[in-house]
Image (cartoon, helix red, strand yellow):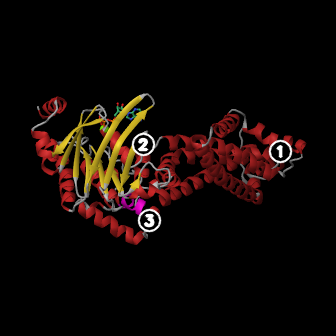
């Protein structure tokens, strides 16, 4: 059984079909890079995986739990699936520590004192333990994004989703965030990331999934798929982003 | 002709003034607490409740914000007894002011709640928080922080406006002024002293609000 099973998923907004018959299996420890043009449905797919969006057909199963089963406790499920967004979305009124400990304390009943230790550990893994008492507006974009990653990690998820988490950052800050991902890949974390960083996808992606017009158009091992695209659409896309 | 200021007679009635200050302070505090609670509940209702409830709350807010406070006070004190609802003057004043402040607070809190970016709300859900948890920690708390200055101003306006309670003979600060004035005929001195006392009350409230802000939202 795969950690994440996406089977024939279709997602529509009223008359607009955004995902068509999408299927994807992700094994524990895999790093999947999703690439594709703007509007191809990459973000929507991630949002369906943790139940932020409903699907109209198909199934999404995470570690044996079906996301779209009405009987599923979405809160429990989301505690096991971290997601980090392009815009960081830290809570501006809370300190870094509290940003990280909010969910563990209110959903898992972890005591304040233990929670601070948890926050510290999560911050160590993103190299920001000295910022534990800072506020989001005192951090650079790259630091905010690393805190957002730490916030997800503190929930000890089985699966991490990343949606273009470096797109709002300049190259230098992008580098520091990618290094955190690199570090995470060594711990064996399963990751699905939507990215425009082809270099990163090639080096660390175990697999690349190319989405086009709401479908999984082509997928395969990172180096092969990016090096020798089989479809014209992927070739066009790669030419556009690489040149 | 020269007018000599003469405060002795005014201060001779200090017991009335003290009584008035205490009444105004106590009346305003109760009204602020309950008016604020109504504001939070109605603001949440106005955004998240079903259509009917949203319309009811909208009607309440608009009715209150578009009629004079004095008219509202007279309706409660002189009008409602006609329907068998009879309140003593202080109770009538507390009810009127609370309902009034509730309406204004609703609008302020609502603006705050609606200013929280969707993305933050989503981040809350994505972390596994429940709806009520997201409301409390991700929406309400930063909204109140943001709207705190506006709320504090509204509360102080309300405190000053409670002076009209003297119209139904609640023995508040303004009522004390009227009594002293009718005894001493020292109009200028009386209202000057009372004005300064209201100013002092307003400052006390401001300091209290600043402390509450620090406790609730301050960075540690
Ligand atoms: N809430 C929504 N309501 C209606 N349509 C939506 C909604 N969210 C997304 N869409 C549409 O779904 C399609 C896919 O959007 P999505 O955000 O998944 O694309 P994407 O591949 O992530 O693009 P980008 O690279 O620009 O982030 C787009 O056509 C978009 O307009
Ligand atoms: Mg997107």
Q: Residue at x 38, y 31 (%)?
A: A17
Q: Residue A227 appears at what percent x and percent y?
A: 9, 39
Mark 1 against mark 3, which lies toward the viewer? 3
Q: Residue at x 41, y 63 (%)?
A: A104
Asked if the residues shown at circle 2 and circle 1 are in contact, with their CB atoms under 8 angstroms apart, the answer is no
Mark 2 against mark 1, which lies toward the viewer? 2
In the depicted structure, whether residue B7 falls above or below residue A10? below
Disc 3 sits on a residue from what chain? Answer: A
In the depicted structure, whether residue B199 falls above or below residue B67? below
- In this rendering, position of residue B69 left or right of residue A57: right
Asked if the residues shown at circle 1 and circle 3 are in contact, with their CB atoms under 8 angstroms apart, the answer is no
In the depicted structure, whether residue B49 falls above or below residue B66? below
**Separation of residues labelled 1 and 3 (CA atoms):** 51 Å
**Separation of residues labelled 2 and 1 (CA atoms):** 53 Å
Query: Do tags 2 and 1 sit on the same chain?
Result: no
Tell me the residue that label 2 is attached to.
Answer: A53
**Closest to the observer: B41 or A23?**
A23
- In this rendering, position of residue B149 left or right of residue A124: right
Residue interval drawn in magenta:
A97-104
Mark 3 against mark 2, which lies toward the viewer? 2
Query: Magenta: predominant secondary structure element?
Result: helix
Badge 2 element: loop
**Closest to the observer: A185 or B150?**
A185
In the depicted structure, whether residue B97 falls above or below residue B29? above
Q: Quadrant of residue B117?
A: top left
**Separation of residues labelled 3 and 2 (CA atoms):** 24 Å
């Amino acid at each position: 059984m795969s950690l994440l099973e996406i089977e024939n998923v279709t997602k529509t907004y009223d008359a607009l079909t955004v995902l068509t018959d999408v299927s994807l299996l992700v094994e524990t420890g895999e790093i999947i890079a999703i690439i594709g043009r703007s509007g191809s449905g990459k973000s929507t797919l991630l949002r369906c995986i943790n139940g932020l969006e409903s699907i109209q057909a198909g199934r999404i199963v995470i570690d044996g739990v079906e996301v779209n089963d009405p009987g599923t406790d979405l809160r429990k499920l989301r505690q096991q699936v971290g997601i980090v967004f392009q815009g960081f979305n830290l809570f501006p009124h809370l300190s870094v520590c509290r940003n990280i400990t909010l969910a563990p304390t209110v959903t898992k009943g972890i005591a304040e004192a233990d929670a601070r230790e948890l926050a510290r550990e999560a911050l160590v893994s993103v190299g920001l333990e000295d910022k534990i008492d800072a506020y989001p507006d005192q951090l650079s974009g790259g630091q905010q994004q690393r805190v957002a990653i730490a916030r997800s990690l503190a929930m000890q998820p089985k699966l991490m989703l990343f949606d273009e988490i470096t797109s709002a950052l300049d190259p230098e800050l992008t580098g520091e965030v990618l290094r955190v991902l690199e570090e995470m890949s060594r711990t064996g974390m399963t990751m699905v990331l939507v990215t425009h960083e082809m270099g990163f996808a090639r080096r660390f992606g175990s697999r690349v999934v190319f989405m086009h017009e709401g479908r999984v158009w082509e997928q395969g091992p990172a180096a092969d798929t990016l090096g020798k695209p089989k479809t014209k659409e992927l070739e066009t896309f790669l030419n556009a982003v690489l040149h | 002709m020269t007018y000599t200021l003469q405060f002795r007679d005014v201060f001779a009635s200090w017991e009335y003034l003290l009584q008035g200050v205490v009444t105004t302070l106590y009346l305003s505090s109760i009204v602020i607490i309950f008016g604020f609670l109504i504001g939070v509940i109605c603001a949440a209702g106005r955004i998240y409740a079903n259509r009917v409830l949203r319309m009811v709350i909208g009607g309440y807010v608009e009715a209150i914000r578009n009629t004079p406070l004095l008219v509202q006070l007279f309706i409660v004190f002189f009008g409602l007894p006609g329907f068998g609802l009879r309140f003593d003057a202080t109770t009538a004043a507390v009810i009127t002011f609370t309902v009034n402040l509730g309406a204004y607070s609703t609008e302020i809190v609502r603006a705050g709640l609606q200013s929280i970016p969707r993305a933050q709300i989503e981040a809350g859900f994505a972390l596994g928080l429940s709806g009520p948890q997201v409301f409390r920690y991700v929406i309400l708390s930063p909204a109140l922080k943001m709207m705190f200055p506006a709320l504090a101003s509204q509360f102080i306006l309300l405190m000053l406006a409670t002076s009209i309670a003297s119209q139904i003979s609640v023995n508040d600060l303004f009522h004390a002024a009227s009594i002293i004035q009718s005894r001493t005929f020292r109009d200028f001195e009386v209202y000057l002293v009372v004005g300064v006392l209201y100013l002092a009350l307003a400052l006390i409230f401001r300091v209290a609000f600043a402390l509450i802000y620090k406790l609730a939202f301050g960075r540690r």
